[in-house]
Each structure stands twice: as structure tokens, then as C-alpha cells.
Image: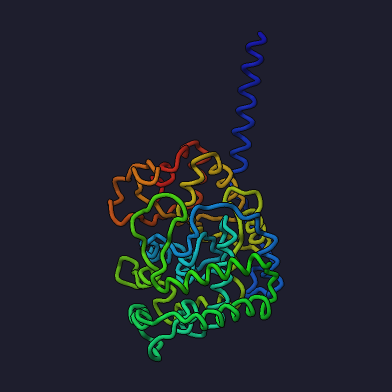
């Protein structure tokens, strides 16, 4: 009899745990609020950056430039399926800008575990706001002068060709760095620490030193396959012949610049599985009647499945205001046998390029988690298209 009671007790505990998980992974409803603001003032922007953020965490690479070459390939489908966007969530460096330009959300949040990524985005913010045109932006980004004045309608290939042989100028770099710091601290009055300023200088000098050939690089471990350069990524296409990067056209750049000027691209320091950043973003959107239209996760989930962090992440996602159209954008790297990754390649995924970009409705994923069909990273990938 005691054994029976203990057995029922164990079953009860498991049932409560399962019910708790189900409750945690049930998407929350949107509230009808005052609406997302068309712009944020500097104080509100910096308050969100500061208060939504968690303490910075570790990642083995600076990740100043993406290592994904196919991230544009899903844009035609996203535009057809999602229509006008409410809020965009993303991670990592400037590939987010290309998605933001394509989807034109009312507000965007870039959530990354590295504080340096937040500071990278503030550097971009300053450079973009100070640069009325693409060529001026690139000139400031790399501290290089193009050989001649460029027509605003030139292609990205022509734009980068103009910078191909331009030499970096140390004095120009020092002047530009001073301008970036002055723009962030003087113009916007953001409360950057001396450590933040040193990190911005480190990031900015990396772009100056490498120029348009700057690439993703790992700070530890053996070498990997060659990565695309910044230039390579900016002249990539969507797989259907259309160039959609944020520097592909002057119009694209102006969309991005307008969003930066209105302070509605908000970088946040946060762990996807952490207790605060994504929850605070979700609360902000819900209180204003907003919802997450697209959530670009890159391949972060791959790392979360090395422990139980994936469960906490999907709990955070379920707390976001989402709907039937809300979509994950994720990268899958076919690295079986390399760098310690043992994920088998999916039959539908060709062996090249080294990564592909996949889409997955968020509600479909959360339902699969609730039903116990997600136990490993490959289950997530197989649910994506």
C-alpha cells in the first residue's frame, strides 16, 4: 500500500510538472494598448536598452560579420506570407538590417548575449545617422575615401568596387571614432561607460583594419571553412536574382536610416534562455498592442540544445505576443563531423552552401514542444522549411 501511494505521488509530481510546462508554453494573448510609437525619444530608447538588458555573457567569437550566405533567400516568402510587420526580433550583427529593410517593422529588437553586439549596433546607429548616403556610410565605416563621387543609383557591386583599392587613413579613423563617440554621448546623451567606449573603439578599429574584407572569425579553436566577407554579403542575392541587402539600393539604405533616426531599432543584451530580456521585450509589445511578426534566431538554438536552456527559451517565446503568422527565421549549418557538431544533414538540404536559412511558424514549434515532439535540435530543424 505505501508503494502504491508513492507511485501515485510520483505520477502526481510528473503531472504537475507537465501541466506547468504546458502552461509556460501556451502563447499569451495580445492586449489592445496605445499602439507602438512611431519614434522613441533618446531617453526612452536608452532606458529600454539599459533596463531590458541582462548582464553580458560569453561567446567564442566576436561575430562582427555574419557567416551566413543564404539569409536573403527567405525574404520573398516572408514578404508574401507576413505582409506588414509589427515587431521584429533578431540576434547578431547587421544581417538583421536586411530583414528589417525587407519587412519594415514598426519596431525591432536585436537581442544578443554579448554586450559587444549591443555596442556594435550603437556604432552602426551613429554611422548610419551621420551618413546621408550609402557611399558616405561606407567611407565612415572603413575610414576610406572612395576614388570619385558615385551616382546614388549604382549597384552594390559598383559601390564596393569604388572602395576596392582605397587605403585606410589612420587620421580619418581617429576623427571618425571621435565623431561616433560624440554622436552617441553628445547628440543622443547615451550613458556609455569607459569600458563601452573601449569596446566600440575595438569594434570600429576592426572594420578600419580589415576594410570591406572583414569576416566572421572565431576567437578560439581550429580554423573553419572560409567565411564570406562583408562585401560578399552585401552583394548577395535572394536566390532569385534580386539583391536585397540594406546596401543593395539607396532606397533600402534610406529605409534603414529612417528607422535608426527614429530610434526604433533597439539593441538589447540578453540570453535567449535568460529570465529578463525577452520577457521585457514581450511585455513592452503586449502593453502597446504589438506582436512579434518575425524572430530571427540564426543558429542560437543549436547551442541551447546542448543543455536544457532550450526549454527556458521556448518558455520565453511563449510569453511573447505572437499570432498565427509569427515566424522563426533560423540558420542551419551542415557541420556534421566538423567542430564537434554531429547533426546529420537533412535529405532536403543540399551539401552546399555550408548553411541554409529556414522558416518555421512559431505556433507550430510551440505546439510541437507541448506535445513532446521536440527533444533535440534536429527535431527543430526538421520542422522548418
Residue pushed farthest front?
A: 170
Task: Report the number of discs.
Answer: 0
Q: Position of residue 39 (x, y in %)?
A: 63, 75
Task: Decide which of 237, 168 is in the foreground and name it.
Answer: 168
Left-right relation of 107 to 82? right
x and y percent of residue 107 in the render? 58, 68
User: Going 28% across and 52% down the picture, which residue do you hit?
Assistant: 350
In the depicted view, which residue is nearer to us: 355 or 359? 355
Residues 324 and 247: in front is: 247
In front of the other: 238 or 186 = 186
Q: Position of residue 100 (x, y in %)?
A: 49, 69
Q: Residue at x 68, y 61 (%)?
A: 287
Q: Which residue is drawn at 67% across and 69% down?
A: 192
Query: In this image, 167 relative to 274: left or right?
Result: left
To which quarter of the image does residue 210 belong?
bottom left
Quarter assignment of residue 214? bottom left
Classify 37 as above or below 217.
Answer: below
Amino acid at each position: 500500500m505505501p508503494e502504491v501511494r508513492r507511485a501515485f505521488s510520483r505520477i502526481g509530481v510528473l503531472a504537475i510538472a507537465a501541466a506547468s510546462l504546458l502552461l509556460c508554453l501556451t502563447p499569451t494573448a495580445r492586449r489592445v494598448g496605445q499602439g507602438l510609437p512611431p519614434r522613441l525619444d533618446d531617453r526612452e530608447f536608452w532606458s529600454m536598452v539599459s533596463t531590458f538588458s541582462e548582464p553580458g555573457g560569453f561567446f567564442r567569437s566576436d561575430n562582427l560579420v555574419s557567416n551566413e550566405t543564404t539569409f536573403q533567400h527567405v525574404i520573398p516568402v516572408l514578404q508574401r506570407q507576413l505582409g506588414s510587420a509589427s515587431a521584429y526580433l533578431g540576434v547578431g550583427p547587421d544581417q538583421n538590417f536586411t530583414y528589417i529593410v525587407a519587412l519594415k517593422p514598426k519596431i525591432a529588437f536585436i537581442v544578443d548575449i554579448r554586450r559587444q553586439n549591443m555596442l556594435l549596433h550603437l556604432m552602426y546607429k551613429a554611422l548610419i545617422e551621420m551618413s546621408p548616403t550609402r557611399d558616405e556610410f561606407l567611407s565612415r565605416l572603413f575610414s576610406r575615401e572612395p576614388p570619385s563621387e558615385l551616382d546614388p543609383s549604382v549597384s552594390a557591386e559598383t559601390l564596393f568596387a569604388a572602395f576596392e583599392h582605397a587605403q585606410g587613413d589612420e587620421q580619418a579613423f581617429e576623427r571618425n571614432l571621435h565623431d561616433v563617440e560624440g554622436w552617441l554621448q553628445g547628440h543622443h546623451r547615451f550613458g556609455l561607460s569607459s569600458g563601452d567606449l573601449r569596446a566600440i573603439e575595438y569594434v570600429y578599429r576592426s572594420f578600419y583594419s580589415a576594410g570591406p574584407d572583414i569576416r566572421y572569425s572565431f576567437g578560439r579553436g581550429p580554423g573553419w571553412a572560409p567565411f564570406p566577407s562583408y562585401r560578399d554579403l552585401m552583394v548577395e542575392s535572394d536566390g532569385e536574382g534580386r539583391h536585397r541587402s540594406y546596401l543593395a539600393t539607396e532606397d533600402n539604405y534610406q529605409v534603414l536610416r529612417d528607422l535608426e533616426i527614429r530610434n526604433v531599432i533597439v539593441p538589447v543584451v540578453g540570453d535567449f534562455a535568460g529570465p529578463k530580456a525577452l520577457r521585457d521585450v514581450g511585455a513592452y509589445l503586449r502593453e502597446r498592442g504589438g506582436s512579434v511578426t518575425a524572430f530571427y534566431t540564426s543558429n542560437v538554438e543549436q547551442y541551447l540544445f546542448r543543455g536544457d536552456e532550450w526549454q527556458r527559451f521556448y518558455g520565453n517565446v511563449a510569453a511573447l505576443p505572437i499570432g498565427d503568422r509569427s515566424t522563426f527565421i533560423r540558420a542551419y549549418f551542415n557541420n556534421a563531423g566538423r567542430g564537434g557538431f554531429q547533426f546529420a544533414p537533412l535529405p532536403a538540404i543540399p551539401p552546399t552552401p555550408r548553411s541554409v536559412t529556414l522558416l518555421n511558424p512559431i505556433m507550430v514549434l510551440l505546439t510541437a514542444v507541448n506535445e513532446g515532439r521536440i527533444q533535440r535540435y534536429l527535431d527543430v530543424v526538421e520542422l522548418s522549411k
